[in-house]
Image (tube, grey):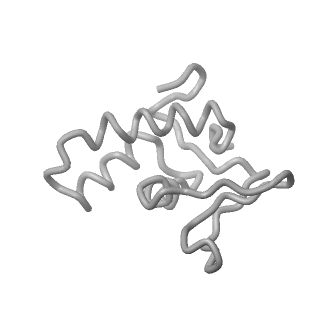
Amino acid sequence: MSGKLNPDSAVALNPLFRMQYEKAQGCYVLLFPEGMVKLSDTAAEILSHVDGKRSPYEVIAALQDKYPGAETLADDVTEFFGVAYDKKWIQPAG
């Protein structure tokens, strides 16, 4: 996990970003004042679990329940959280 992101503490979407489905793009996006980021289906699935109440570890557990047998899921989600935190898409809740 990245620098200041505690994997045991709840994370939230940065209030400067809003995730929504864009019909014209055919995918979920993160909207922010300067533009838009297209999300992969995987990124959207992970971010849909970021609710300000769950920690990264709890998100990983929920995804492992939903996708049993995905061997690299924990590593991939951990890596994604690091990237999302570095890009300021997510932040510690509170």
Residue 27 as seen in the image, left or right of residue 17: left
The residue positioned farthest toward the right in the image shown: 33
Q: Indicate whether 42 appears above or below 85.
A: below
Quadrant position of residue 24: bottom right
Q: Indicate whether 74 appears above or below 51.
A: above
Of residue 59 and residue 21, the one placed in the foreground of this image is 21
Q: Residue at x 49, y 38 (%)?
A: 81
Residue 16 as seen in the image, left or right of residue 40: right
Horizontal and vertical percent for residue 40?
A: 48, 57
Q: Residue at x 79, y 51 (%)?
A: 16
The quadrant the C terminus occupies is: top right
Q: Residue at x 30, y 48 (%)?
A: 61
Q: Indicate whether 12 appears above or below 23.
A: above
Of residue 75 and residue 7, the one placed in the foreground of this image is 75
The residue positioned farthest toward the left in the image shown: 69
The residue positioned farthest toward the bottom in the image shown: 23
Q: Residue at x 30, y 39 (%)?
A: 74
Horizontal and vertical percent for residue 46?
A: 45, 53
Horizontal and vertical percent for residue 39?
A: 55, 57
Horizontal and vertical percent for residue 55?
A: 47, 42
Residue 23 as seen in the image, left or right of residue 59: right
Q: Indicate whether 2 appears above or below 34.
A: above
